[in-house]
Image (cartoon, helix red, strand yellow):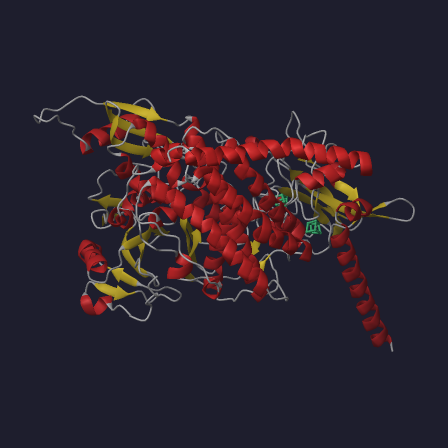
């Protein structure tokens, strides 16, 4: 019958239309009984991005934001450990691996020198990332041997001017890193501890 | 599907003594053909040895000695490639064109002329393709330097240890980067208007006459580059007789950034995120092809678990690509946005999986040589499991109900944009386009790579050769991909995800390799030449989006101008890959 395919297709749109409002009713009931809301709530957003979602699928950005997964990467930042007296112990040793591996070559590092001896010190004097050029690939974080550079989750970076990140803007505490990437941070912490322990054991063995 | 016959060895030297010699350079394979006899040898390769599908044609600049043109031909019944090359002097590189034998070489030879300056004698329309007429030089030649040129290869020395930041615009092209050809006089400089050149080519190839043999008048109109249905900045000069298309020339290059030159400046690893930007819908497939090629060169295996992860990701990528294709195809037919947005919902769920594993929705940068960058968590595997067992099949069926029998869709697609199997092979079509013309050629079966030989799946194939067949092939393919993922999820072992230690300094022995995958849009190939340095000497991408346009004119001739948009949409092009 001519038109059967059309009707079949229209039934799909109709059921989608129906479910949008039906789900509103379902969620209305949930709100009364369990206090769960369909919009502007974490459970509502999680539902709309799950396999159960039907009808309305969209998220009302910026009022609502999708949670980003741990591995999400945006721009890199530099990690520092907080010293006991509040000093920033920058992890970066200015080894230059990230600058070498960076595909668009947007990392610029000035190695610092000891003013007394003139010899290089394991600390960056200046560290720039040209955020306009960075392609968010994450290779710098992947290959830094000191866990000093990591990928940030903050994606709201729109600005009216060019964005050049310097040391001031790049440095973030290790606690922040642990808050956005808990699993990774814990794994790396463990590896570091194991390394220290094996070093200590070796030193002891040597001493003995 | 006919089993790939890889056992027959071809001996071209026995057939053509003194014309063909085997390529004996270490790391190289194939045959070197005397350019004077190329046509003869190529004809035999196609007709006697039945290598009917010319996959890739490209040039290599072996600065300062010579140029080389490399051909990869395949049999549509399956099996490995026959590689043959011609070598020519750098100062006057002229090669006979193989377009009379394989029409599929047409756009690729134009590309080689444009970027490397190799002249193909007998080519019907040898114009520049990506650069504009009047452009000085051929950018892929090793002695050609771009504006903002810093060094031949990365990493640049200025970045560390004295990396005082210098914005790119401070290195203006007006300083020592500005370069004029010797004897250049801006007053006297003239070149042919590229538009006129394209129109002339059209007029040369199509001389419309009425029934009395009197030449009739035609109009040429331009579709694009800004037309909303052209899927990006793509333009076609269309020659019309009334409303009927009688000739067509695709005009491309608006998004050209010379991906290959960038790739030759990059180190091997640095290219990985750049491949994401080719077909930005399918960065997983792009990674796959590039990783295969480099792994072939390096001769390293891939970790078992990583193989499965790769296949799962590549197939998820195919599903979302085809879903978007359904939506966009319907957009092109005038069904604005409803199907497209339905498709985007499922795509969103797949992109969430990419984001959780690779860290980015579209620019995945996920594959590494020997494995993948990170493991897939159990949580994500469960999500994939739920998707392929529950949601996706349901939603594909819904899409099917929404579209497949819709009378408007059927009448717009059936019988339009016809391409015969013979023409499809001759014009080097690959992917769903080729299979919709009745040629069951799928690289996952015909020349299996990775672990595709372990999965049970059917090659989607429809013999009609029209747009409806292209639609059906893609519908079937989505279902087959779901099948593959289901099997892969069952078989995936625990274990390491890298077969070698991850390193940013990758040692690649000298040689050449061609890695190809069945990307959602067609055969995506990477031809890579290494000379043992940290950077590839030649990095070529065989882009299905570009090469599938070879037959666009054939499919459009005789159709109405209103159908052009749909025919183009059915090819499934993406400009990031087409223009590179
Ligand atoms: S961030 Fe890491 S890789 Fe980069 S210079 Fe510092 S220590 Fe080296
Ligand atoms: S994310 Fe990639 S592009 Fe950005 S700074 Fe790191 S290595 Fe460079």
Image x and y of residue B379, in percent: 68, 54
Q: What residue is shown at x 33% (from left), y 27% (from top)?
A: B562
Compared to residue B207, the image places residue B274 above or below, namely: below
Image x and y of residue B15, in percent: 19, 67
Image x and y of residue B557, in percent: 25, 34
Task: State ligand 2's quadrant.
Answer: top right
Q: Is residue B238 left or right of residue A122?
A: left
Residue at the farthest right position: A85
Residue at the farthest bottom position: A208
Q: What residue is shown at x 58% (from left), y 47% (from top)?
A: B391
Q: Nearer the viewer, residue A119 or B26?
A: B26
Q: Is residue A73 left or right of residue B488?
A: right
Compared to residue B319, the image places residue A197 above or below, namely: below
The quadrant in which the C terminus of chain B is found is top left
Q: Nearer the viewer, residue B28 or A47?
A: A47
Compared to residue B63, the image places residue B323 above or below, namely: above
**Residue B181 visible in the snapshot:** no
Q: Is residue B506 left or right of residue B235?
A: right
**Residue B260 visible in the snapshot:** yes
Image x and y of residue B312, in percent: 55, 56
The quadrant in which the N terminus of chain B is found is bottom left
Q: Nearer the viewer, residue B325 or A10?
A: A10
Q: What residue is shown at x 50% (from left), y 57% (from top)?
A: B483
Residue at the farthest left position: B212
């Amino acid at each position: 019958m001519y038109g059967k395919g059309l009707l079949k297709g229209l039934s799909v749109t109709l059921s989608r239309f129906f479910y949008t409002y039906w789900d509103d009713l379902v969620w209305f009931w949930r709100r009364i009984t369990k206090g769960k809301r369909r919009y502007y709530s974490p459970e509502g957003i999680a539902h709309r991005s799950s396999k159960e979602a039907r009808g309305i699928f969209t998220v009302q950005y910026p009022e609502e934001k999708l949670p980003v997964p741990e591995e999400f990467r945006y721009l890199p930042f530099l990690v520092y450990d907080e010293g006991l007296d509040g000093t920033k112990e920058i992890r970066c040793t200015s080894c230059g691996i990230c600058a070498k591996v960076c595909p668009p070559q947007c990392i610029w590092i000035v190695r610092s020198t000891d003013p007394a001896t003139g010899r290089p010190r394991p600390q960056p004097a200046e560290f720039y990332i040209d955020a306009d050029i960075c392609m968010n690939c994450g290779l710098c974080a992947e290959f830094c041997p000191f866990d000093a550079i990591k990928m940030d989750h903050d994606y709201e970076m729109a600005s009216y001017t060019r964005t050049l990140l310097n040391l001031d803007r790049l440095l973030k505490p290790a606690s922040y890193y642990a808050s956005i990437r808990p699993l990774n941070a814990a794994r790396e912490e463990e590896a570091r501890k194991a390394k220290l322990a094996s070093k200590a054991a070796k030193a002891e063995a040597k001493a003995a | 599907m006919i089993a790939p016959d890889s056992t027959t060895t071809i001996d071209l030297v026995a057939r053509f003594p003194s014309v063909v010699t085997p390529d004996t350079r270490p790391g190289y394979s194939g045959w070197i053909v005397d350019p004077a006899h190329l046509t003869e040898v190529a004809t035999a390769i196609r007709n006697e040895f039945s290598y009917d599908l010319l996959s890739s044609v490209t040039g290599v600049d072996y600065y300062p000695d010579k140029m080389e043109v490399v051909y990869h031909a395949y049999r549509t019944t399956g099996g490995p490639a026959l590689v043959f090359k011609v070598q020519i002097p750098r100062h006057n590189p002229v090669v006979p064109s193989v377009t009379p034998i394989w029409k599929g070489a047409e756009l690729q030879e134009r590309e080689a002329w444009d970027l490397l300056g190799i002249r193909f004698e007998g080519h019907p329309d040898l114009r520049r393709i990506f650069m504009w007429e009047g452009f000085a030089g051929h950018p892929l030649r090793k002695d050609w330097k771009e504006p903002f040129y810093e060094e031949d290869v990365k990493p640049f020395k200025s970045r560390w240890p004295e990396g005082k930041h210098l914005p790119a615009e401070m290195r203006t092209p007006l300083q020592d980067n500005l370069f004029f050809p010797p004897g250049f006089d801006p007053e006297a400089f003239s070149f042919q208007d590229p538009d006129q050149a394209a129109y002339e080519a059209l007029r040369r190839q199509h001389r419309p006459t009425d029934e009395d043999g009197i030449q009739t008048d035609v109009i040429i109109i331009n579709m694009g580059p800004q037309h909303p249905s052209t899927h990006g900045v793509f333009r076609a000069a269309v020659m019309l007789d009334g409303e009927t298309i009688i000739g067509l020339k695709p005009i491309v290059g608006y998004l050209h950034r010379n991906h290959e030159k960038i790739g030759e400046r990059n180190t091997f690893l640095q290219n990985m995120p750049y491949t994401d930007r080719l077909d930005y819908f399918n960065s997983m497939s792009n990674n796959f092809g590039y990783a295969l090629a480099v792994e072939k060169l390096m001769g390293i295996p891939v970790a078992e678990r990583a193989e499965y992860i790769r296949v799962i990701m590549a197939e998820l990528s195919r599903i979302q690509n085809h879903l978007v294709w359904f939506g966009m195809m319907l957009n092109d037919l005038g069904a604005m946005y409803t199907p497209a947005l339905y498709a985007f919902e499922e795509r969103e769920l797949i992109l969430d999986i990419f984001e959780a594993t690779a860290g980015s929705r579209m620019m995945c940068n996920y594959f590494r040589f020997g494995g993948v960058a990170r493991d897939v968590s159990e949580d994500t595997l469960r999500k994939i499991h739920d998707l392929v067992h529950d949601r996706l099949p349901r939603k594909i069926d819904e899409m099917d109900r929404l579209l497949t029998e819709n009378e408007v869709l059927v009448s717009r697609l059936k019988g339009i944009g016809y391409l015969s199997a013979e023409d499809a092979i001759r014009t080097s079509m690959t992917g769903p386009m080729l299979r919709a013309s009745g040629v069951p050629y799928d690289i996952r079966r015909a020349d299996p790579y990775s672990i595709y030989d372990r999965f049970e799946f059917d090659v989607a194939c429809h013999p009609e050769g029209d747009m409806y067949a292209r639609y059906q092939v893609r519908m079937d393919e989505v279902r087959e991909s779901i099948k593959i993922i289901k099997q892969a999820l069952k078989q995936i072992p625990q274990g390491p995800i890298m077969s070698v230690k991850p390193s940013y300094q990758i040692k690649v022995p000298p040689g050449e390799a061609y890695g190809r995958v069945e990307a959602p849009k067609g055969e995506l190939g990477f031809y890579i030449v290494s000379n043992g340095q940290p950077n590839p000497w030649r990095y070529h991408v065989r882009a299905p989006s570009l090469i599938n346009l070879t037959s666009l004119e054939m499919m459009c001739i005789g159709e109405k101008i209103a159908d052009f948009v749909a025919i183009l949409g059915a090819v499934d092009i993406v400009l990031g890959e087409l223009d590179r």
